[in-house]
Amino acid sequence: MEYLASDKIAIVDLGSGDITEEELDEDLVLEKIGGVGITQSLYDRFEGEDPIVLGSGLLTGSLVPGSALSVMTAKSPLTGKVSHVPVVLDAGIEFKYSGFDYMVIKGTAQKPVYLWVHDGIVDINDADEVWGKDVWAATDYIREFMGDDLIQVLGIGKAGESGSPLATTCINYWQGGDRLGFGTLFGQKMLKLIGLRGMGLLEIAEPEDFVEDCLALVSTIKSGPLKGKKGIAQMAVTLGGEDIEDWISPLIHRHMACFNTPIPTNSFVFLDEDPALLEESKVNEPGMLLTDIHPLITLKKMGLSAKDACQVLKECAKYGIDAAAVAELSEKAGTTALEDMVKSFPELKGPVDSAGTSIFSPWAMVGNQDRDTWERRQAVSYILGIHPLFALMTSELTEAKLLDLASLGTELELTQETLDEVVAEVSGKS
Amino acid sequence: MDIYERFKTLNSRLIRGENIPFSEGIKGLSHPSGTNRDKPLAYPAIAIYAGQGASHSWLWFVDLFDRMGLYDLCFLTDTTLKENGLRGIDVLAMSGGDTFAIAEGLGKSGAREIERFIRSGGLYMGSCAGAYLPLNSSKPFLNLFNYVPAKITNLTRSLPTALRLKEKFCTSYGCSFIFHPVRETVELKTNGFAPFGKPKTLLAPLYGGPPMILSDPAAVLARYTGFTDHTLFLVDRKLAEETVLGTAAVIRKKMGAGHFHLYGPHFEHPRFPTANHLMAAAMYWDLRRGNPPCPRTDALQGDAFLSKKSAKHFIRAVKREISNARIVAAGLEMQPVQWTIGNKVYDPGKIRVFLEAIWSRLGVLEKAPRLCIQPGQDGATMRHTASLTSLVRATKRDSDQGRNTPDLARTLFSELSHSSMLFLDIYFRTQAYHFGGIHEA
């Protein structure tokens, strides 16, 4: 596979320590396009070995607006279904640039390990120094040890290590889109984290036309209905969700976008620092990044202050437990004190509604959207590598346009018919 | 076909022993006249100096020769040059760096080796510091290399005001100073003498190389004629014009049976194809001999190959460490640090120049049918590249904590140079072996 790809699939056996590589066959791309189309087929191939499959979409890391997404496919311990969770912020593209398009992680390590994926190399390293550390400390350790603050870390905290069914995979210091307990799977495999860094480049088949079309699309989106929208609260309202803007806005310091996503869907709040501060804070941990609206809505309903709610989310991120599940179970138990919620982390168990019933993480399900439309949009995003929240908000990003760009970028003839077939297949409707 | 492909095609014929005269093999030079027009071209054995005092710019020579299919390369340090390193060599490429440190490192015996080499027909190609080295000087160590009676116009007793880049602006020279009036791209004009062909204007980058004056006008191949939009003025423009324009930028000087080619600007810089072309053409013009067999490919024996499994392990190990090191080096580039080593100022960006020289060639070795290597060379390369990762990480860690890192940086750059030499030796052995299909036939 020559364009928009690193052309490599890594098969990592944590049990034996063997790592093998395969080329990404162009015929596979023509048949399954990419993203969950291919992670699903790799999952099926290695199903007997409990794999977690990490993969990028066909357009991930390109100039297509919103091309921030990689995905993980595995059997969710919460729903029992083979499911998919998004890998966003900058981790999705870092995976693609690290020299692999897909990585199958199978087997169980005999002792804690972490994967260091860099420039087409996968190393299985001893995790003695990081096992037992919370998510924030583990991220700090890896970045300091490897010597680069741009390393993206997909990892678990104590929740995953201790087998909590609500453990989530975090991205660097923050909760990502994993509502399906993939953190538990990491823990079961004795896999503390995956460090990602790549300095590779992607080749584009028709670079001039591709770039021109992408820039035109960005311009159209930025002047459309999303013009001026920013931050997690406004995203929720845009999608028909509850308005929490007045409640949260006094804490917001800045908004942050995932890679190449024209609208920032995340907001950074200051908890131990003045949110109006414009210079760099001297406080060690001044606040946190909000990436998920659902736990905030629940905690607000429970009567928590915005600051306490964010504090809960911060502790969840450090512990590596899904904040939406924590909020839901705390509401059911009537636990409203911050300290009590944090103390309850080790004991919390499902089932939880926050895991949803779809094969796609409900992280991007905001408001009362039509279920079939939502499923379809998620599938397309997860196949092509488009940020799933952004895709829901952006009608300009049509399937036809995305396929055009994919064909332009790869020189492959990718048709609507193929996309329909792959969507049907991953949705179990083929 | 670009000039590099043209040279590569030519060299693939030369390595097979084809008899090709200069006028047929070297195109695009407006038919230079002279006695060497009909001389048969040779596939040269080239040594690149990468020892004490050499900066990263020796890697530009590596790029140039690599792109042109000149694979019979070896790398010399001050020590190996003095230990008969020039035996069997046709061309010595002396890159930029710290002239004083180069002279000191080579010392009397190094100077004697170089003189013997040239007098017996060898070609010395000096660029920037490599051009300063053989110019007449009264200073200790430099005076061991008094081979070319040229003067430089950027020597002064009263230093002018530096407008920018004070750390790269000048070097003390006894009671005087050598100052650098401009940096980056300058305009040159060739004088119409062989081997450069009819007069033509071209661009080349100047990073401290000499503006020279020579009494023999026929020895001047090109002069500085102007500045460009990309020229960076370190002194007042008028002074820069007075100091640089009209002086010799390239000199060709005979000594015994051999020659000096001295380039003030970096003609070997990879982004200047016209300058690259002229430099290569001049090299062929003054090569000492006709088409001998390539010594390196003849020297290869069966025991100099790595098994497929060992080759895979070797490439993967080197790849791992170079990847680790370049990731840290990229992080280090975000920091406002610089190191002074000898008379030269190094910034973190230079680390990656070495690392990329290795990284960009790993793919070629991955695809090579056989990896040519001397016994023990693979282990040494793996050890040294692993130490690179540790050194860059230690430098970054100390730098993050606000500590000065001059000693670490000195060790790091020495190790970068050493590791690059080790790796590139394997790379060029392998390329030379497979080039032209002579061993596949």
Image (spheres, rainbow, N blue to C red):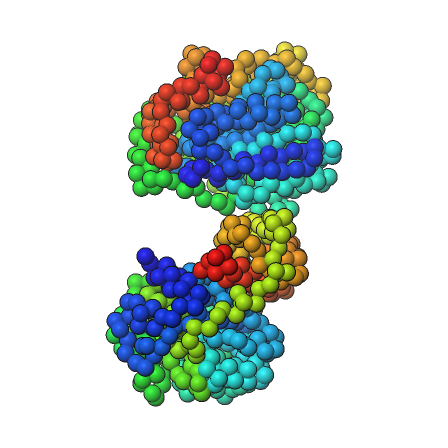
Where is residue A391 shown, x and y percent of the image?
41, 24
Total number of numbered labels?
Answer: 0
Q: Give the image location of residue A103, x and y in percent.
A: 56, 33
In this view of the protein, can residue B135 be seen by the observer? no
Closer to the camera, A158 or B191? B191
Question: Where on the picture, by quarter, is residue A217?
Answer: top left
Q: Position of residue B340 (x, y in %)?
A: 55, 67
Against A270, residue B245 (above or below) is below
Residue B80: image quadrant is bottom right
Considering depth in this image, is A219 or B62 the residue closer to the camera?
Answer: B62
Q: Nearer the viewer, residue A378 or A179?
A: A378
Q: Nearer the viewer, residue A298 or A170?
A: A170
Does residue A186 appear in the picture of this structure?
yes
Compared with B157, B277 (above or below) is above
Who's the residue at 44% across and 37% down the image?
Answer: A1
Instruction: Tell me the quadrant of the picture where the N terminus of chain B can be found.
Output: bottom left
The residue under the point 38% across, 61% down is: B9
Residue at position x 28%, y 78% in the image: B33
Query: On the rendered structure, is A10 left or right of B184?
Result: right
The location of residue B14, given as percent across then percent down, is: 41, 67
Residue shown at the point (50%, 46%) measured from the top left: A199
**A59 left or right of B26?**
right
Q: Seen from this angle, which residue lies furthest front?
A: B441
| B121 versus A203 height, above or below | below
Image quadrant of residue A152?
Answer: top right
Q: Is residue A270 above or below residue A84?
A: below
Please indicate whether residue B335 sits to the left or right of residue A203 in the image. right
